[in-house]
Every structure is written in C-alpha cells, then in structure tokens.
Amino acid sequence: MQTEQDFAMSASVAESQSTVWPIHIEVRVAQNATSRFDTIRHAVHAYLTSSLSHIYLPSTIQGWEDVPLLASSIEKIVAAESPCPTASLPIEQTALQIHVYQPTDSDAFEELTSGSGRGEDEQIMAASVCELPSMSWEGLWESLIYSDDIKSKLLDYIYATVVFSDADVDFNVVSWNRVVLLHGPPGTGKTSLCRALAQKLSIRLSHRYSHARLLEINSHSLFSRWFSESGKLVQKLFSSITEMVEDEETFVIVLIDEVESLTAARAGAMAGTEPSDALRVVNALLTQLDKLKHRKNCLVMSTSNLATAIDSAFVDRADIVQYVDLPPREAIYEILRGCLIELVKKGIISDVEVPSLPQAQIFERTAQFSNLSLDPTVPGQSPPSASQTERLQSRERSKSIALRLLKLAQKCRDQEMSGRSLRRLPVLAHARYIGTLPSALPRVSVRPNGPTKSSGYEPRSAGAAVETWLDAMERVVESQATERARLHQ
Ligand SMILES: Nc1ncnc2c1ncn2[C@@H]1O[C@H](COP(=O)(O)OP(=O)(O)OP(=O)(O)O)[C@@H](O)[C@H]1O
C-alpha cells in the first residue's frame, strides 16, 4: 500500500519531470572571432539541442569543436549553475539562456584620477576602471569555494533587483539601496568574490547592457593630505561615477575595498575624537550612495575585515550584509585539489587522477569497511587478469590520494587557514621540499633552432610524483603550525 510519503515523492518526481528549468549557458568567444554574436548564439542553441540528450550542471560542454562555425569562433562553452535540484537534466526539460561574451584582454585597466582641489597639477589616483567581461577575471567565480551558498545568494539578489526594476516597483513603497557588504577575516576571498560577481553580471546581463565596468575605489587615497579636502575628493569621484552611470547602456559595479577606512570615523567624530575631515568623508559617501540607489544600472559592493568599525548608517544601507568565513574542510579540499590539478596541467606534478570531493567522501566513508585487496584471488577462482589488477591498483592509489588530501585539509582547517594562505602552500612546498630535488633543477629546453631564451624553470617532462607533493605539503603545513605557535607565544 502506498503511504502519504510515497504519494508526495511520486508527485514531486512527476513535477520535476514536467518542469522546464532555465539553464544559463555561457559561451566565450575568441578574440579573433568575426561572426556576429546572434549567429553564434543560434549555432550554439542548434548544436546543444540536436547533439546532447542531457546537460550536466555545472559542466564544461565538449564536442562542439567539430562544428566549423563554432570551432572558428568559440573558446569555451559552460553550463553554469541552475536552481534545478538535480545534477543533470534532459535537454527537453531545459530553457536554454545562452550568453555570448568576448572578454577584453587583461591589460584593459584605466585609472580614474581626481584633482585634490589644490592646483591643476595634483591628481590623485582615486580608482581603477576595468572593462568587463575581462580576461583577468576568467575562472575566478569557479575558483571560489564557500560552504554556504554565498555565490548564488548574491546572484539571486541581483536578479531580484532586476525583476523589481523592470516591473517599475514604486521605490517609495518597496526600496533597496544596491549596496552589498561582505565582511570577515582577511584572505577569505571577499575582494575576489566582488570581482567575480562583477564579471558574472557583465556576462549574464549582456542582453540588457552592452557594456559593463568595474570601478575599484582606492579607499586610502581618498584621504587628502590637505585637511578638509577629502569630502570633496569623494564628491568628485562620485560625480565621475554618476557620469558613467548616465549611460544607461552601461552597467557599473563600484567596489569599495576596506570600506571601514572610509566609514569608520563618524562615531569617533561625533564623540569629538576624530578630525572633522573624516566626518565629511562619511557624510559625502552616504549622500552619494543615496543618489546612486535610484540608478538601475549600478551596484555598489564593499568589503571589510572589521565590520564592527563601520559606521552603522553605512551598514544600514547595505541590502545584503554577508559574513565570509574561513573555508571549511570540504572547501579546503576543493582549493587544494584545484592547486594540484593546475600543477599536473603545467607538468610540475606527473599526470594523476585527483578524486573529486564527493568521490573522496565515498572513499572516506567506506575506508573503515572496505577490505579491498590488491590480490583478490579467491580459492578455486582463476587469478585476476592484468587489466583487473591495474584497475584495482589505480583505485587504491586514488583512494590513498583522496584520504591524504582530506586529512591535509582537516589540518589546514585546524590551523584556521584562509584561502590566501592555502593558495600559497604549493609554492612553499615546492621551494622547500621539491624544488631542491636534483630532477627539479632548471633546464634549458632545446628546440630545432637552438636553445630557447628561457631562463626559468621549464616544466619537467615527468613532474614530481603526487605522493612527493603530498609529503611536501604535509611538511609545510606542519612547519606553518610551528611558526604560528611561535608567533603567538
Ligand atoms: N573561499 C575561497 N575559495 C577559493 N579561494 C579563496 C577563498 N578565499 C580566499 N581565496 C583566495 O585567496 C586569495 C585572497 O583573496 P582576497 O584578496 O579576495 O581576500 P579578501 O578577503 O579580500 O582579503 P583581505 O580582507 O585581506 O583584503 C585569492 O587568491 C583567492 O582566490
């Protein structure tokens, strides 16, 4: 007999089978491509709907290289995250939203200067501006790993504001400020997340905004050495931003890093302990933010290591105040795995399969029960073939790599390492324990027309074994723990 639970489950399966899910497909066009974006979009749609039975989420789509138009124009096709609860979807249950973009090259940064008000010649570098999407921020979004769903939370917030703006919701009744504040310990990826989100938005909103720009404010430079001028500097900077936002075809993301340095002072000033210049800066900033909130094509993102020091009037303006924590063990595993894959790709570590996190977790769960023997000979049965033995050995090796990497991740977690500290471990491990091995000495590669000019390390034809790398990483983490303990003595 079917229980109520069975009915509920079959109803939800039936529902999920009939639902059509929006899937974002991001198509990166090559720098030298000449085809129109519309033509590429149609060709990608035709390819996906005719060649794929399912789409895996998220995934990099392969196989389009055989279609001449796509091969000549495209560098990468990615099926991005989706609200869909399953990891794969039949193609007929997808509503493909194809975003075609061509990133600008990495040097497309420009400086925004602001006069100090003390003569024509004194210009202060108040912000840097970057055209989006930019090659510099490619892959950044995917490389950032958090335990709670911070990334989709931020994307969903932007989509909600777009929906409300489109519906012309009365701002006097329902209002929002287009300000986001990310706070948390140093090196947890706050600035990177802002840049990655800016890049994502420039791709996802490209059908509405033909241009996008990321403007990074240099908070410290806004304090003029001329007493009382800082408030004016903020105003001047924001009038440049307003000019930029005037162009309704451009989406502008303003990033204020270390926002506490701009907004910390008001409470102190009120208490009579801070110079009034700081008070002017906070007031100028708040006034300018209030003006910007009416612009549909603007988003202000701010970061801080010291949220308690931020003026409460600023915090109150933030629609989202998000704490960004140190990475948990699972996120650390993914970060270290990403580092290892990169080193394998570049030939520093010899080719090896690095298990994904779910695979590693399965190995971990089964480790205590499994008695996988490398010699599975059962009396009375013929011995395993060479290929069976090879498969078993390779599985054993993957398991051992996964378990060691998980253990390493736990050690890093125990030491409360930030993402920044984690990303530098491989270079320290190499410098201390691998680079010194005789086989890792720099060498000059010889090509048919003589030695190349290269003076640095060349990727070794057979990189270090992954086990050597794991040894080195474990030793580095150990030595970091000792150093930290000394620091806190
Ligand atoms: N959760 C994470 N996942 C992946 N990489 C991370 C993570 N956190 C930090 N990183 C890496 O650490 C480095 C530093 O990140 P970032 O400068 O964005 O941190 P931050 O929080 O802004 O630091 P600070 O507060 O000191 O300015 C970057 O290379 C980033 O990729």
Image (tube, rainbow, N blue to C red):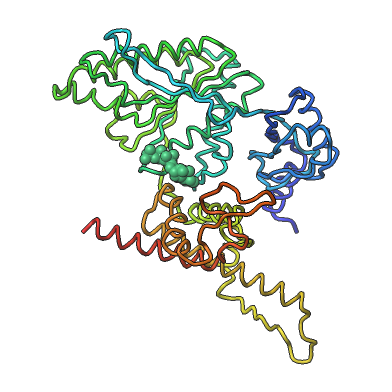
Q: Quadrant of residue 283?
A: top left
Furthest toward the front, the residue is 450
Q: Residue at x 47, y 18 (%)?
A: 175
Instruction: From this view, report whether residue 262 is shown above or below residue 327.
Output: above
| Left or right side of 129 for 348 | right
Q: Can you say which quadrant of the picture contains the C terminus?
A: bottom left
Instruction: From this view, report whether residue 476 is shown above or below residue 400.
Output: above
Q: Residue at x 68, y 33 (%)?
A: 28
Q: Residue 167 or 78: which is nearer the viewer?
A: 78
Residue 291: percent from left, percent from top: 42, 12
Furthest toward the right, the residue is 50
Q: Residue at x 50, y 25 (%)?
A: 109
| Left or right side of 127 for 53 | right
Residue 416: percent from left, percent from top: 37, 54
Q: Residue 311 or 114: which is nearer the viewer?
A: 114
Residue 67 visible? The answer is: yes
Q: Residue at x 48, y 13 (%)?
A: 294
Furthest toward the bottom, the residue is 380
Image-quarter location of ligand 1 = top left
Instruction: From this view, report whether residue 358 is shown above or below residue 70.
Output: below
Q: Quadrant of residue 362?
A: bottom right
Residue 24: percent from left, percent from top: 68, 34
Q: Residue 96 or 445: which is nearer the viewer?
A: 445
Residue 358: percent from left, percent from top: 60, 58
